[in-house]
Image (cartoon, rainbow, N blue to C red):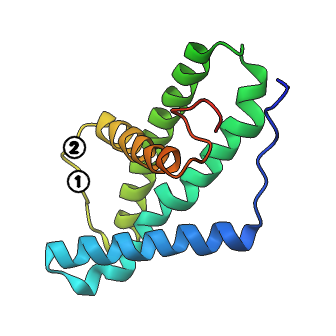
């Protein structure tokens, strides 16, 4: 492991509280925008894929992949963005499957597969901009 790169640790109750709150709020916002408040529970459940799942993707990078990669900033950044993209594609597929199983609702079936990947990369970049603005370790400062 590169000196200064410590494994990321966080209590599970903090992770659950944060990621579930994000999913509930995102579900509510999407339901209100769509004018379908009755879909709020389903939309909140679907939002758990990128919120809760995204936390575990970050842990995978920080604690397993990053220490095994060369320390070069470009290699680290490319690997992280690639992981985000692949995870986003996986989350989009999982969200679609969840919607189909629970309510036979083919959500966004006309979107190409790569939209989920680009969307998740965008979400992560915004989250890391907020972290950097708060002087916390992030993708942009190479510390997080």
The residue pinned by badge 2 equals: 111
Q: Is residue 30 left or right of residue 51?
A: left
Q: Is residue 5 left or right of residue 106?
A: right
Q: Give the image quarter of residue 72.
A: top right
The picture places residue 82, in percent across and down from the top left corner, at 50, 27
Q: Are marks 2 and 1 in contact (CB under 8 Å)?
A: yes
The picture places residue 109, in percent across and down from the top left corner, at 23, 50
Q: Give the image quarter of residue 53.
A: bottom right
Q: What is the residue that sits farthest to the left in this orientation?
A: 35
Q: Is residue 38 left or right of residue 138?
A: left
Q: CA distance from mark 2 to mark 1?
A: 6 Å
Numbered tag placed on residue 119 in the rendering: none
Provide the secondary structure element on which disc 1 rests.
Answer: loop
For the image, the number of numbered tags is 2
Disc 1 crowd rating (10 Å Cα; few below 14, some 14-19, many 20+) is few
Q: Is residue 90 above or below residue 114?
A: below
The residue pinned by badge 1 equals: 108
Provide the secondary structure element on which disc 2 rests.
Answer: loop
Q: Is residue 134 above or below residue 32?
A: above
Disc 2 crowd rating (10 Å Cα; few below 14, some 14-19, many 20+) is few
The picture places residue 25, in percent across and down from the top left corner, at 38, 75
> What quarter of the picture does the N terminus occupy?
top right
The picture places residue 65, in percent across and down from the top left corner, at 71, 29
The foreground one among 98 and 56 is: 56
- Residue at image position (38%, 37%) is 117
Q: Is residue 130 left or right of residue 20?
A: left
> What quarter of the picture does the C terminus occupy?
top right
- Residue at image position (25%, 70%) is 30
Q: Is residue 43 visible?
A: no
- Residue at image position (52%, 52%) is 134
The foreground one among 98 and 26 is: 26
Q: Is residue 11 above or below residue 6?
A: below
């Amino acid at each position: 492991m590169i000196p200064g790169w410590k494994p990321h640790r966080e209590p599970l109750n903090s992770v659950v509280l944060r990621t579930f709150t994000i999913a509930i709020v995102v579900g509510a916002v999407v339901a209100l925008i769509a004018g379908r408040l009755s879909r709020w529970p389903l939309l909140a459940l679907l939002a758990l894929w990128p919120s809760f799942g995204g936390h575990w993707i970050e842990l995978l990078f920080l604690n397993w992949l990053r220490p095994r990669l060369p320390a070069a900033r470009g290699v680290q950044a490319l690997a992280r963005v690639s992981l985000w993209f692949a995870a986003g594609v996986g989350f989009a597929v999982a969200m679609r499957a969840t919607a189909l199983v629970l309510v036979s609702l083919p959500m966004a079936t006309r979107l190409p597969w790569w939209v989920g990947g680009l969307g998740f990369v965008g979400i992560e970049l915004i989250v890391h901009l907020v972290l950097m603005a708060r002087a916390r370790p992030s993708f942009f400062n190479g510390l997080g």
